Image (spheres, grey):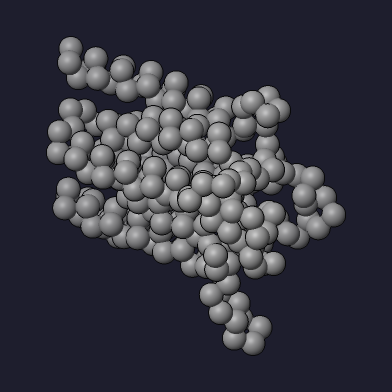
Amino acid sequence: MFPVLFNIGPLTLHTYGLLVATGLFTGVYLSALRAGKEGYNRDVVLDLGFYIVLAAIIGSRLLYVIVEYKTYLDSPLRVFKIWEGGLVFFGGVLGAIPVAVWFLRKHKIPFWPMADIFAPYVALAHGIGRLGCLAAGCCYGRPTTSWLGVTFTSDQAIARPLNTPLLPTQLFDSVNEITIFLILLVARNHKRFDGQLILLWLMLYSVGRFIVEIYRGDPRGWIIEGVLSTSQGVGIAVFVVSAFVFVKLWKRKSA
């Protein structure tokens, strides 16, 4: 893969950072366009997107650092080198939601309708960002002998071992999110209640992420060593809560 696109003197353009930024920009921009079509102020939605992105980056990095704290004990300044990889998506979700609630209350915008506007494009943004993970070699899979194997050869890649075919779990997660994005676009035309799309995304992603985690080969946090990873545990909790709220809102609409 290509962890670094090019170097110009002291300037290094990391593929990971470029694709994550591209995904985030695309998601916020398309959300603002959609919000404008539904009668919301696009500039306010762009501001909301900025706060969400900032909170998501901080939250995703913070959860990763907490889980992998031993990695940073000797070099604490590496905490800020997010271009090297190391963002836990569920941490981003947990960081973004309270900030979004605060912002929407401040501007007197209803939470659920706006969450539904963002939902498909969050999935798309994450799908693009995961390609950055593939390029950098983070979140890599187990060694494999199948035709799916991806071999990392650059010393700058995070994946280990080098020169060994590994399952492209980054690509699995990207396909998962792009598929969810398409599902949500279809579901949007048949929406029965506000909150349906964001809750559907949370449930679908939790299931997909749980499965992808089974094939991961990188060192990461565990709730039950070798059995249940941190992301799987968080995913179970997110799925249960989302399903509960989904059913509750569905029944309320049907009553």
Q: Position of residue 109 (x, y in %)?
A: 30, 42
Q: Position of residue 80 (x, y in %)?
A: 67, 59
Q: Position of residue 77 (x, y in %)?
A: 75, 60
Q: Residue at x 48, y 51 (%)?
A: 147
Q: Residue at x 50, y 60 (%)?
A: 132
- 146 or 223: nearer the eye? 146
The count of marks equals 0
Q: Position of residue 219 (x, y in %)?
A: 69, 43
Q: Residue at x 35, y 51 (%)?
A: 124
- Quarter of the picture holding the N terminus: bottom right
- Quarter of the picture holding the C terminus: top left
User: Residue most toward the right?
Assistant: 74
User: Residue most toward the bottom?
Assistant: 9
Please tell me in which quadrant of the rendered image residue 252 appears: top left
Is residue 139 in sight in this rendering? no
* Relative to 44, residue 99 above or below: above
Please tell me in which quadrant of the rendered image residue 246 appears: top left
* Relative to 207, residue 79 above or below: below
Q: Residue at x 64, y 65 (%)?
A: 153
In screen coordinates, is 126 left or right of 139?
left
- 255 or 17: nearer the eye? 17
Is residue 70 in sight in this rendering? yes
- 46 or 15: nearer the eye? 15
